[in-house]
Image (cartoon, rainbow, N blue to C red):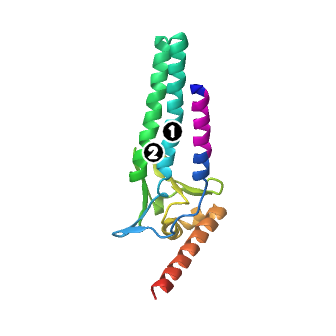
Amino acid sequence: MQLIIAFAALGVLLIAGGWLLRPVPPARFRGARNGTAVVLRPPRGRNAILSAMAIGPTLLVVVVAATAARREGMGTVGIVVVAIAVALGIAVFAYFLIAERTMQVRVDARGVERTDPLRRTGIAWAEVETIAYNGVSRWFFLTGPAGVRLWVPENMAGIGDFADGALAGVRPAVLASEPATKEALEQLAAEAREEDAADGKARA
């Protein structure tokens, strides 16, 4: 009975999480300013949901392992495997929980920088070697010198500032090599200008 309840709970968690994490437009096309930079942030609660989804399978492993241990016992190898699986689950849980507070992308006239719980990655606009847009997952992927790679999700608040920076700073030849990406950037920049105009009318 415990296994049935555990699998049912996991199924509900995955279905609910998948619905909550579906691609959605950014809350705002303009991000919060920090000096000369603009800070882009993911939708509030998104990484917390991923954190919850990570702990679900971990709890299922614990339930299955406890049930198996009661029925048939568990050898040293089994205990080690379960311990590794639980440790990985907790690590993923902690990563996304920390990411909920720390993950951001900073954009300024010089380039773009992404910060997550494990590292900070930046690329100067002039050094961007490729920039591509994934219309299914809805994120931009940039590469730079020495194999630097950087992802920028489209649903981040402030994505319009990223689009402006990329269109102004990335070399024309690089943009021209990816027409669909350039079109996506231009569309986001246009929507950001529309938001600016709407905000101006609201303040008038």
Q: Which residue is drawn at 49% across and 42% down?
A: 52
Local secondary structure at mark 2: helix
Q: Residue at x 41, y 40 (%)?
A: 94
Asked whether the residues under the numbered discs 1 and 2 touch, taking CB atoms below 8 Å apart as contact, a structural biologist would say: yes
Q: Which residue is drawn at 61% across and 58% down?
A: 133
Name the residue that disc number 1 marks: 54
Q: Nearer the viewer, residue 189 or 98?
A: 98
Name the residue that disc number 2 marks: 96
Q: Which of 36 and 60 is in front in this view?
A: 60
Q: Nearer the viewer, residue 134 or 96?
A: 96
Q: Distance between the residues labelled 1 and 2?
A: 9 Å
Q: Which of 99 and 13 is in front in this view?
A: 13
Q: Which residue is drawn at 53% across and 19% down?
A: 67
Q: Give the range drawn in magenta.
A: 4-15
First in sequence: mark 1 vs mark 2: 1
Q: What residue type is labelled 2?
A: Phe
Q: On the rendered image, what quadrant is the N terminus found in?
A: top right
Crowd class of label 1 (few under 14; some 14 to 19; many from 20; radius 10 Å): many
> In this view, which residue lies farthest toward the front?
1
Q: Is residue 74 above or below residue 33?
A: above
Crowd class of label 2 (few under 14; some 14 to 19; many from 20; radius 10 Å): many
Q: Which amino acid does label 1 sit on?
A: Ala
Local secondary structure at mark 1: helix
